[in-house]
Amino acid sequence: MDSADPVSYREAIAHLRFGQKWSDVVDEELRSLAEYSTWDYVTLEDVPAGVTPISSKWVFKTKELPGGGIR
């Protein structure tokens, strides 16, 4: 691998070698989440008093194949 894994979306899509791939993977994941209705985007104004919504974040991890390639 030519560099450490990105720690943010902005860093991922700015990656010189894999930026487009990271962007494509994020788009694919968002489509899948929407298709299966696994989450709802809410603003803090929409959350009832006393309720704490569950947050999320992207984790970018380069996966190396057994033969040495990258997936």
Image (cartoon, helix red, strand yellow):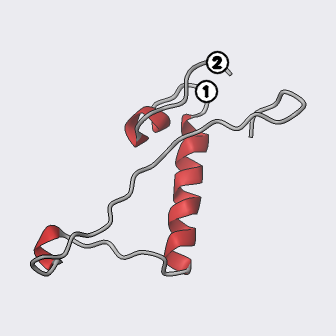
Cα gap from disc 2 to disc 1, whole angstroms: 9 Å
- Tell me what residue is drawn at x 26 percent, y 70 percent: 53
Left or right of residue 56, residue 23 in this image:
right
Q: Name the residue under label 2.
A: 2
- Tell me what residue is drawn at x 42 percent, y 42 percent: 9
Q: Residue furthest right?
A: 67
Q: Name the residue under label 1.
A: 17
Q: Residue furthest top?
A: 2
- Tell me what residue is drawn at x 45 percent, y 31 percent: 14
On screen, 22 above or below 11? below
Pick the front one: 54 or 5: 54
Left or right of residue 39, residue 42 in this image:
left
Left or right of residue 46, residue 4 in this image:
right
- Tell me what residue is drawn at x 61 percent, y 27 percent: 17
Residue 22 at x, y percent in the picture:
56, 43
Which amino acid, by three-letter code, is at mark 2? Asp
Pick the front one: 33 or 53: 53
On screen, 67 above or below 2? below
Secondary element at tag 2:
loop
Pick the front one: 61 or 27: 61
On screen, 22 above or below 70? below
Picture quarter with the C terminus: top right
Using a 10 Å C-alpha cutoff, classify the residue at mark 2 as few (fewer than 14 neighbours), some (14 to 19) or many (20 or more): few
